[in-house]
Each structure stands twice: as C-alpha cells, then as structure tokens.
Image (spheres, rainbow, N blue to C red):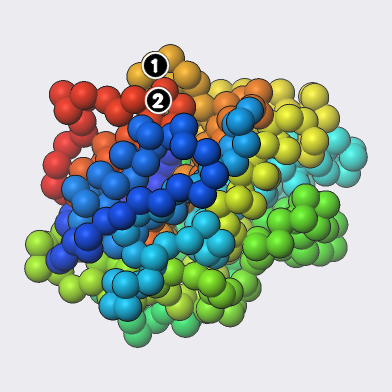
Amino acid sequence: MKQRAARTTSLAMVAVALLGTATAAPSAHAAERTDRGHEATRTALRALVEKGELPGVVATARDGKGSWSGTAGYADTATGRERSPAEHFRGASITKTFIATVLLQLEAERRLSLDDTVETWLPGLVRGNGYDGSTITLRRLLNHTSGIANHTDDPAIAHNSAGPGFPEHRYDTYTPEELVAVALKQPPRPDPEKSPLYSNTNFVIAGMVIEKATGHGYAQEITRRIIDPLKLRGTSFPGTAPQLPDPHPVGYSRLHRNAPDTEVIDATEQNMTWLGAAGDLISTTGDLNRFQRALMRGELLPRAQMKEMLEEVPDGEVLGYGLGVEFAELSCGVRVVGKSGRTNGSLSAMVGTADGRHQLTFDINGDWLRDSSLYTDVIEAEFCGTIPAPTSRGRQGA
C-alpha cells in the first residue's frame, strides 16, 4: 500500500501496509473445530497473534476434507473472551467482490455492458479537473484502471474516518456523491491502463451504477442475488447503523499511528458510509468461504462473465487485479484468487483456488501489523502446508 493508510489493503500487498505494533500482546491459544490436518495454519495463527502482538484471529478453511476452523488470541482482551468462528466482523474491501459479481450478472442479463461508460449511466458525475466519464468504462472501474483518484487518500477523509479524528467522527454519514466529489479534487492517474491505481472510489461509482440499472441500492441487489440464494445468514450491509451483530469481537485500532506507545482504542462501532459500496460488508468466515466457493465454481456467473472476472491486469509488482478480485502466486506455486479488507479494528482476507476446491477466510480484530509476513504466512500455511523461512519475511516497522 503505497497510498495513504486509510486505504483498505490488497491481498498480496499487505507487506507494504505496515502499521506498527500493539501496546500489549495477550497470551495466545489455538483451537480446532473439526479435523486435525491444518497444523501449519494453526502454527501461523498463533504466530500472528504472539509475534504480531495482536488481540486475536479466527480462520475457517474448506477443502475436499470438509470445513475446519482455528482461533488464537481473544475477541475481548479485557474479559478474556476467546475468538469464535461464529463471530461477525467487518469485511471492508471484500465488499468489492460482491459488487463486481452483481455487475457481471447484470451484464449476463444484458441490462448493461462492462464496456458502457460511466457517463452513459451517471451523466456528469465524473467530469472536470482532467476527468472525462465518457472515456472510463465500467470494466475499468472494476479492475482499477480508471485513473480515478482514491477518495480515502483525501487528508480530511483520512483524518476523520480512519485517523486521529475517528473518535469524534465515527458516526458521520457520507453520500456516494460526496465521496466521488472528494476524489475528483485530486487529478486523475496518467496512463492508468498501463499502471493500475487501487481506488475505493471506483467501487463507490460501481455501486451507483447498480442502483441506476436496477432501481435498487447495491445492498438490496446483493442480498437478493447472492446472500439469500446462498443462505449467507451472517452477511449484511449496515447502511448508517454503526453496530455489529452479535456475536462479534471488539475491534481494536491504533488509528494508523506507528509510535510504540500509541493508544489502542475500541473501534467496534463505526458508520461505514465513508467506504460504502467499496467496503461496508459485515460477514463471517463461513459465509465468505461459501460465497467464494460458489463464485469460483460458476454458481453465480455464466462462463463468459467468470472469464471476464478472472482476466488479470498486473500492477507491475507482485499483484494482479481482476474484476473485484486480486491474484497472487504463493511460494509453493499455488495461485490464489480473492480479496482482502481493512477497516478500523479489522484485517481480513478471503482467498481460494480458482477451481473452487479450497477456500480460506480469516479475520484479525486489530488493524496493525508488526511484521506483514505474519499475515501472508497464514495464507501460505493453508495452501502450501508450510510457513516460509525467516529469510523470506517482509520489512519491519512503518
């Protein structure tokens, strides 16, 4: 993440979003629910909490042997309540995969084309300061080649929604139009198709297109098309409501400050309209595995649209962007597809193999990383069965 800290993180790029250390580390324990075949993953979860000085983590994996869940650390460090696979958490940018899926469904229904322009659907929205919505297609929104600036890089938004101003502004409400207007104050990225720019604003606009095309908000369409058919009973979109459904962990945040003595605050309650269609999802590890499995197995999209989703645009470094998804190749050669997310008090990832046979979703109820490789080690452990040697670890510090 070479952008401002308020940005939600990307799957394989979390190594450059190092957020500092916690003030204290709880003792860690690990618990498995079903089979005993995920030793490397259990070890990685314990290391994430202990070495990363994080409050807790929960992970659920699904493969040909069934479903397994493991935890380490605490949901509430004050009471000693343990993390649980039943907990709801904020999925943040994992929302983007749901948004892209609905737009691709609408294309399959011939209600729109991803080659339509933003100007066609939202006349006048993206205009001025070097922007021309008639040159930006819906496809370019979904794979981050639009060149539209990221509204969460705006200093005021960053300060109030995910920085020192959060305690005072955590219940503020933003409209999509306001977020887009903030983004357009910044100039567009030159040659974005050659160098993708991850921008939350792309998906705020995509959510607006869903509403224009269907007459319903994106949350209603996702619920009707994905949540209800897949029976994702722990998945929802809160709108302006700041609470998490029970059960849930306490969301601990350092508000993206790196000093060792930075106070850790309770950020569980927050109005997520500062991300909206780019990141307001609430879900569970089991629900997200079910969604990822159904998506990759072709249960939600026809073959043509699935192919579109998985067309990769390299970022020039280590990450590839599809439509609402990201790609990474692991040390053992396994290629995974998925999405990660970060908001105040939550770091999460939903990843799996493109054949739909193996999924992993995990959530940390803290938003900092002392060593980013501890996060990616969980993915490596689950899909490769080993944890990389220390020489492969990422940078320390900020």
Residue 1's spot in the image, x, y percent? 32, 43
Q: Is residue 163 visible?
A: no
Alpha carbon of mark 2 to alpha carbon of mark 1: how far? 9 Å
Q: Does the residue at mark 2 contact the one at mark 1 (Cβ under 8 Å)? A: yes
Residue 83's spot in the image, x, y percent? 42, 62
Q: Nearer the viewer, residue 62 or 214?
A: 62
Give neighbour class at mark 2: few <14, some 14-19, many 20+ (Cα, 10 Å). some
Residue 143's spot in the image, x, y percent? 57, 35
Residue 223's spot in the image, x, y percent? 77, 60
Looking at the picture, does residue 162 appear above or below residue 269? above
Q: Which residue is mark 1?
A: 332
Element under disc 2 = loop
Element under disc 1 = loop
Give neighbour class at mark 1: few <14, some 14-19, many 20+ (Cα, 10 Å). few
Seen at 22% across and 60% down, the residue is: 27
Q: Is residue 41 visible?
A: yes
Q: Which amino acid is tagged 2? A: Gly
Relative to 90, is 50 on the left or the right?
A: left
Seen at 54% across and 44% down, the residue is: 34
Relative to 138, is 62 on the left or the right?
A: left
